[in-house]
Amino acid sequence: MDKELYLQFAKVEDSHWWFVGRRLIVDKIIRQLNLAQNSHILEAGCGTGGNLVMLSRHGQISAMELDTMACQIANQRQVTQVKLGSLPDKIPFTDDYDLIVILDVLEHIDDDLATLKALYARLKPGGLLLITVPAYQFLWSRHDEINHHKRRYILRSLKHIVKLAGYSVHYSSYFNIFLFPVVATVRLLRNWLRLESSEDASSDLKLPTKPINQFLTFLFASERYLMGRFGLPFGVSILLVAQKTLPSHER
């Protein structure tokens, strides 16, 4: 991504409704995984580090990031030493992890299958991979182009590639379901009428007024009480938890 976007993320990711809501959802899903104490967790592509404090509550956290400036900002949080690295071929760790988290990163990478295989190699047997990605190619917009996305996913295609990489799917769901009608309507109208400018696309990162931000945070984050129990049928994004296959003698 462009450095300017990283700077915008760093300014708003602790308070913007989308970042806060996603973080609360991911936190709830991880709690439901019942990880052992002192589990080893890797965030691959941590950006400017907005999830590190939350993840550190679940175990011993490691993190990597492609962009030098984003890595420096993340390290200023003093949660863990964030190392420079890239997917799929430059993972700066040799440890085996109980959980790897890759949040809205896979869509940026040309070879998503090779990336999933590389992360598989860094998991302990029975270890878990938690992924979030944007959903539905028909929602493609200038926002995706500015963020250098390669694709958006449907749940079926994501599950397919995860299984090709050797994992079994533990849980999967769409999310951001409550705001889906608004997001879909706005993006489709902008695309059809060709109304969207680069300024419109970057407006997703602008912090709304406090009451609106609080309401959107509440609405988005409330989905965490539904997720984990069953899968939501549609949404702006997808969350999937996959497991590295256990050796046959441990099954």
Image (spheres, rainbow, N blue to C red):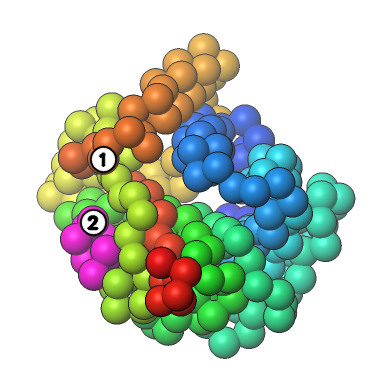
Indicate which disc residue 155 carries: 2
Question: Is 220 positioned to the left or the right of 73 in the image?
Answer: left
In terms of image quadrants, where is residue 140? bottom left
Q: Residues within 10 Å of mark 2 (few under 14, many from 20)?
A: some
In terms of image quadrants, where is residue 190? top left
Give the number of marks: 2
Q: Residue at point 41% right, 54% down? A: 241
Indicate which disc residue 20 carries: none
Amino acid beneath label 1:
Gly
Nearer-the-camera pick, 219 or 251: 251
Residue 42 in percent (x, y) is at 65, 62
Residue under label 1, please give it.
231
Magenta range: 153-160
Q: Residue at point 51% right, 34% down? A: 28
Residue 203 in percent (x, y) is at 45, 40
Principal secondary structure, stretch drawn in magenta: helix
Whether residue 203 appears in this view of the structure is: no
Q: Residue at point 20% right, 41% down? A: 234
